[in-house]
Amino acid sequence: MLSIILQAAAGAGLAKLGGALGAALAAVGAGLGIGRIGGSAMEAIARQPEAAGDIRANMIVAAALIEGVALFAVIICLLAVVM
Amino acid sequence: MIRYFLCFLMLISLSAFMLIANENQSTTGNSSRQDEQEIAENHSIAEKEKFEPGVFIFDHIGNAHEWHIMTIGHSHVSIPLPVILYSKTKGFSLFMSGRFKHGHASYKGYKLELTGQNKGKIVDEAGNLPLDLSITKNVAALIFGIFLILWIFLTVAKAYKRNPLKPPSGLQSFIEPIIIFLRDEIARPSIGEKKYEKFMPYLLTVFFFIWINNMLGLIPIPPAGANLTGNISVTMVLALCTFVITSISGNHNYWKHIVNTPGVPVWLKIPIPLMPLVETIGVLTKPFVLMVRLFANITAGHIIVVGFLSLIYIFAEMSTGLAYGVSIISISFNIFMTFLELLVAFIQAFVFTFLSALYFGMATEEHH
């Protein structure tokens, strides 16, 4: 059974499989990370509504940093698929 | 105001130089589709050309020697751009890229490669790459962005110079809150009260350059609509500018932290300099990540939008009615994605500027 899967993979291109899986994992990682940031930002705003502006700005900065890393992984996967 | 102007001139001349000098590495052609269409024409009429989404997407986000607007049937509507080449044997050559007839004619011994390793680049008869200083699509978009930014800011600056005490009105009332936001939220907290003024011209320049070029990339009408900030040469120059300014303005404290970090045991530094090595890698990765973050965000946004559009073409090959149905979903999703891309345009400019200010602050920090 495994040999059939491996044959199919070798035929279709292992690089494309690896690229797609890598991009999906990067999306999962980014989703988890930014979800946590959003969650704590919501809790912090609930505790102290006057600080909502500061918290929002910091949340966006942290989310952009995490998204940068995730898109870094996506670019590498794109390179793996295309080259 | 001269300071702003000079900083901006430095930024764009550096980027223009690196863009055009890097053309040989970063040009992709719009040529494979035409190649396929030519082959399709040569084959029997019964064979219909297949839509290739990968090629479609890469043509839209890549660079080219002409500005392709649309394709009606088998003819291309595109604006030819100047080609400037220098080779050791032939010297300088200057002509319009229309001479290449989309890669099917050679001119003055040069031709546009359509396939293979040098796809999209100009090669001479021997297959070597000349020094390519052409005005490609990205360079033309860069020049348009430069004129737009200069026009906006010189207007605002002139209005202030004419009457410095008058409350802002018109274009000023749009630009001034943004500049104050950058000064009070980004520059002052990160760099400190005493030193932030030196870096303000660069921070303002880089913020507006990235933001305006990101937004121009979202408008599909030429001369906007080129994927400029999604070109890694451009983002590399921006990150290089930040790196150079950080290194130049680094004070004794900053370099001491890199070479001889205080508070770290001696055995991590003396036989094998592990700590300096780690710190140097940190110094080099910070601008590198700046470059990749901006490039990846903008290019990914463009790929998503063009990908959803190409979904319509893929379904059109199966049946026309299905294509109409898919087009409603695809276009509404594209509208949503474009709003998200507007937000990303601002956020990426903000994050680039904020991190640059942070690095400048770290470089000029006093010992505490």
Image (tube, coloured by chain):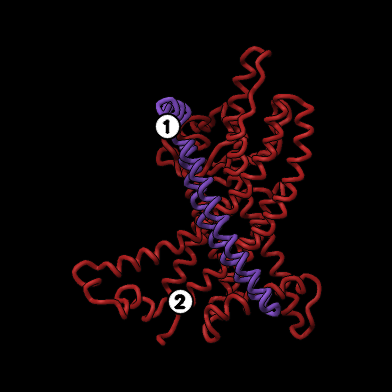
Chain colours: A purple, B red
- What's the chain of the residue with tag 2? B
Q: Is residue B233 above or below residue B161?
A: above
- Is B61 displayed left or right of B328 in the figure? left
Q: Position of residue B2 (x, y in %)?
A: 60, 74
In which quadrant of the rendered image does the C terminus of chain A lie? top left
Residue found at x 63% / y 47% = B302
Q: Which mark is residue B362?
A: 2
Q: Position of residue B213 (x, y in %)?
A: 64, 57
Q: Which mark is residue B32?
A: none
Residue found at x 52% / y 54% = A29
Give the SS element for disc 2.
Answer: helix
Q: What distance separates the C-alpha of mark 1 from that of mark 2?
A: 48 Å
- Name the residue at the left extreme: B271
In which quadrant of the rendered image does the N terminus of chain A lie? top left
Q: Choose between B200 and B87: the one closer to the eye.
A: B200
Q: Is residue B250 above or below residue B309?
A: below
Residue A46 in sight here: yes
* Amino acid type of the residue tagged 1 in the rendering: Gly
* Badge 2 density bin: few <14, some 14–19, many ≥20, Cα 10 Å: some
Q: Which residue is mark 1?
A: B127
Q: Quadrant of residue B12?
A: bottom right
